[in-house]
Image (spheres, grey):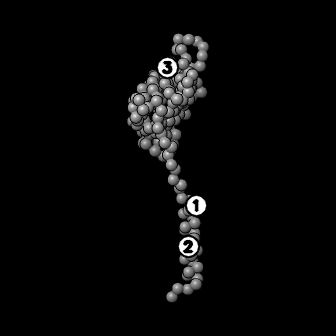
Amino acid sequence: MITRRMVTFVVFAVTVVCGSSVIHAQQPQIPTLQVCNSSDVRGDGRIKIDRRADLNHSGSFGVKLSLKCGPNEAPYPEGTLDIYEIDMSDSIFGGTLTATTIEQITTTGKHTAMAFLSGRCTASGIKGCRFWMMITDNRFSTTGTSGTPDIVSFLVFDHTGKRVAHGTGPVVSGFFTVRAEN
């Protein structure tokens, strides 16, 4: 026999369970549409960050890439990207990582063109490697003594979302070219 007390308890229990699941439910996130514009990003350079150097680390990393995308080049991002000799004081990862999938190439700017890149990568000991990168082509002459050097920034996460390497600094040797059609 169902009593009023039992009905009250069931209604209370359902309210608590349903209410708490709504409160703790993860809202789905709609990813941004990653359509690349006409882009051509190339270069090989060494980046040095003095504050990331110590007795055991050079505070530097290198980047070598050749990427393109756009309706007249390749409908999806294609090319190669390596971030090599990562050797910075507060990065968990040191060594080389290689992009396996380029998911986004977006370029913008005219006089100081910028490229934004993201995708998946492989690196020794990093499960679920994902990267983000920005390159600014400041059209700096590597033979001159004045001007603003190119800037490179990168961020690498593992499968848990933990940052394993990052850096932002000036190119001290080599150069990058970013062709952006906007």
The residue type indicated by label 2 comes to Ala
Q: Nearer the viewer, residue 131 or 138?
A: 138
Task: Find residue 10 and report its horizontal and vertical position in percent.
Answer: 54, 77
Q: Residue at x 52, y 85 (%)?
A: 2
Q: Are marks 1 and 2 in contact (CB under 8 Å)?
A: no
The residue type indicated by label 3 comes to Phe
Q: CA distance from mark 3 to mark 2?
A: 65 Å
Q: Nearer the viewer, mark 3 or mark 2?
A: 3
| Helix, strand or loop status at disc 1 | helix
Would residue 133 be seen by someone viewing this image from the given angle? Answer: no
Give the crowd class for mark 1: few <14, some 14-19, many >=20 residues within 10 Å: few
Q: Above or below — where is 163 with respect to 53? A: below
Q: Above or below — where is 141 with respect to 163? A: above
**Left or right, residue 69 beside residue 59:** left
Q: Residue at x 58, y 61 (%)?
A: 23
Q: CA distance from mark 1 to mark 2?
A: 15 Å
Task: Find residue 84 and report its horizontal and vertical position in percent.
Answer: 44, 28
Tell me which numbered mark, 3 or 1, is placed earlier along the sequence.
1
Q: Nearer the viewer, residue 54 or 155?
A: 155
Q: CA distance from mark 3 to mark 1?
A: 50 Å
Q: Residue at x 54, y 25 (%)?
A: 113
Q: Look at mark 3 in the image and give the residue it sits on.
A: 175
Q: Look at mark 2 in the image and give the residue it sits on.
A: 13
Would residue 9 be seen by someone viewing this image from the given angle? Answer: yes
Task: Find residue 25 and report its horizontal and vertical position in percent.
Answer: 54, 59
The residue type indicated by label 1 comes to Ile
| Helix, strand or loop status at disc 2 | helix
Q: Look at mark 1 in the image and give the residue it sits on.
A: 23
Q: Residue at x 43, y 42 (%)?
A: 128
| Helix, strand or loop status at disc 3 | strand
Q: Nearer the viewer, residue 144 or 30?
A: 30
